[in-house]
Amino acid sequence: MEALIQNLIKEGYLKTSLIIEAFRSIDRKDFVLEEFEDDADVNAPLPIGYGQTISQPLTVAFMLELLQPQPGEKILDIGAGSGWQTALLAYCVQPNGKVIAIELIPELAEFGRKNVAKYNYIKKGIVEFICGDGSRGLEKEAPFDKIIAAASAKELPKEWREQLKIGGRIVAPIENSIWLFIKNQDGTFRETEYPGFAFVPLVSR
C-alpha cells in the first residue's frame, strides 16, 4: 500500500498531508471482499457485489483533494458502499467532526458499516451509517460543510445544493466527469469540471 501511496503522491493525486495520513492509516484491505484482499493495494476498482465497486485509489485521492475535508466538519457521503471513503473522511474530520454515510443497498450498507466499525468510528460517534436513498440528500441532518458522492448522476440534485452551507463544497460525478461545486455567499455555485472518469450510476428509489 505504501508503494501505491508514494506513486499517487509522485503523480500529483495526493497532495495534502492530512489526506496522505488518512490513506496511510486506513487500510483498503479492510474494505474489500475476502477474495480480493491480495489486490487491495492495486490502483483499480474492485467488485464488492450487487453491481457496485470499491473505487480506484487514484479516483478517491483526486476527489478527496477537491473536497478538502477538515477536522470538525460535517460531511455527507453518498453511495458509501464498502465504507473505505467514509473511513478516510472520518480520519480527516475527527475528533469533533461527523461523517454521515448513506448506502441504498441494504447488504452493502451492512458490509460498509461492519468495515468502518473496525476503526471504532461508529462507536465514537464520528460516523453514522444509514441505509437509504442519498439522491435527495438528508434533510434532517442538513446543512453540511461538504457533500461527496461515489456514483454518477445525470445532473446535480437540487437537494444537495440546498443542503450545503455557504462556502461549502460538493464533489460529485456527473456522467463521465468529476465536478467540484463551491457555494457562493448569494447561494449560486462556482462549478469546475474534470473529465475522463468512469463511475457506476447513482441509484435512487
Image (cartoon, rainbow, N blue to C red):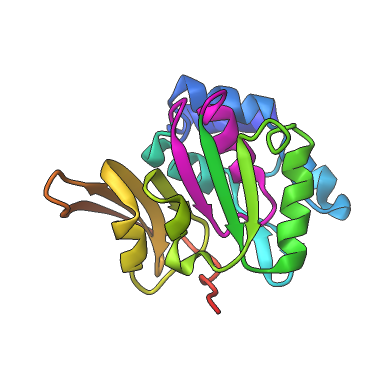
89 is higher (above) or lower (below) than 112: above
User: Foreground: 48 or 137?
Assistant: 137
Instruction: Say whether residue 45 is left or right of residue 141.
Output: right
Q: Quadrant of residue 26?
A: top right
Question: What is the residue that sits farthest to the bottom in this orientation?
Answer: 205
149 is higher (above) or lower (below) than 41: below
Residue 71 colored magenta? yes
45 is higher (above) or lower (below) than 17: below
Residue 158 colored magenta? no
Instruction: Say whether residue 119 is left or right of residue 145.
Output: right
Instruction: Say whether residue 156 is left or right of residue 44.
Output: left
x, y percentage for residue 53? Answer: 66, 60
Q: Residue at x 42, y 49 (%)?
A: 147
Q: Residue at x 25, y 46 (%)?
A: 182
x, y percentage for residue 180? Answer: 31, 50
User: Foreground: 96 or 58?
Assistant: 96
Magenta stretch bounds? 70-96
Q: Is residue 123 visible?
A: yes
The C terminus, quarter of image: bottom right
Q: Is residue 43 visible?
A: no
Question: What is the residue that sits farthest to the right in this orientation?
Answer: 35
The N terminus, quarter of image: top right
x, y percentage for residue 132? Answer: 60, 66
Marker count (numbered): 0
Instruction: Say whether residue 181 is left or right of residue 72.
Output: left
Q: Residue at x 35, y 68 (%)?
A: 157
x, y percentage for residue 46? Answer: 70, 56
